[in-house]
Each structure stands twice: as structure tokens, then as C-alpha cells.
Image: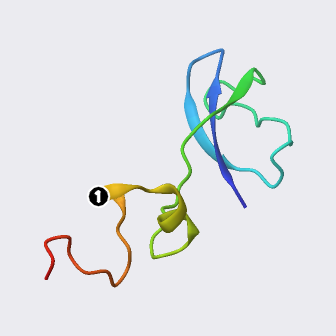
């Protein structure tokens, strides 16, 4: 279940809330109880690691960090 960031337009309070559906209405502000709350765009809370498709297909040059690869110095 995703956790979304919200901001109250009335008082400016920012908060996170676990929301069961991404299209659910925004919750009321916990500080001023206003319903004028908007969902903010935020970064995801996970990092991809390992040697999967995201490592081999989208990174180039020195950005690659392939699991089990030799160092670039030729050892």
C-alpha cells in the first residue's frame, strides 16, 4: 500500500498518509481539519540494486555497477 505526501492549501501543513487507492480522495488536514488538501508528487521510497535489467539496460559507462564484475583497472 502506497504512502502519499499531502499538503494543506489552507494552513500549509505537509503530511504523509497511507492511502489504499491512488484515486481515493485526499484526507482532511490533521492540523486545521480543512478538506482543501492536495496530493504532492514525491520520489519513490525504494532503490533498485543488483544486476537486473535496470542495471544493464539504462546505465552507461562508469555508472554501471554490475554485481560480480571486475574493477575497470584490469585486475
Q: Is residue 48 visible?
A: no
Q: Position of residue 21 (x, y in %)?
A: 84, 51
Q: Is residue 11 visible?
A: yes
Report the residue at 62% width, 34% height from top: 41
Quarter occupied by the C terminus: bottom left
How is this picture coloured?
rainbow
Report the residue at 59% width, 17% height from top: 11
Q: Is residue 49 left or right of residue 54?
A: left
Q: Position of residue 31 (x, y in %)?
A: 61, 29
The residue under label 1 is 62
Residue 56 drawn above or below residue 63: below
Report the residue at 54% width, 74% height from top: 52
Name the image quarter holding residue 65: bottom left
Name the image quarter holding residue 62: bottom left
Query: How many dots with numbers?
Result: 1
Q: Is residue 64 left or right of residue 33?
A: left
Residue 4 drawn above or below residue 66: above
Name the image quarter holding residue 64: bottom left
Q: Is residue 56 left or right of residue 36?
A: left
Q: Is residue 47 left or right of residue 26?
A: left
Quarter occupied by the N terminus: bottom right
Q: Residue furthest front?
A: 74
Nearer-the-camera pick, 67 or 13: 67
Q: Position of residue 14 (x, y in %)?
A: 55, 31
Report the residue at 86% width, 42% height from top: 23
Q: Position of residue 26 (x, y in %)?
A: 78, 35
Secondary structure found at label 1: helix
Residue 25 drawn above or below residue 58: above
Nearer-the-camera pick, 54 or 33: 54
Crowding around mark 1 (Cα neighbors within 10 Å: few <14, some 14 to 19, many 20+) is: few
Amino acid at each position: 500500500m502506497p504512502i502519499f505526501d499531502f499538503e494543506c492549501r489552507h494552513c500549509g501543513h505537509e503530511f504523509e498518509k497511507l492511502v489504499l487507492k491512488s484515486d481515493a480522495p485526499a484526507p482532511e488536514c490533521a492540523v486545521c481539519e480543512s478538506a482543501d488538501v492536495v496530493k504532492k508528487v514525491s520520489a519513490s521510497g525504494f532503490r533498485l540494486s543488483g544486476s537486473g535489467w535496470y542495471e544493464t539496460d539504462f546505465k552507461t559507462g562508469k555508472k554501471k555497477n554490475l554485481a560480480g564484475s571486475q574493477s575497470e583497472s584490469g585486475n
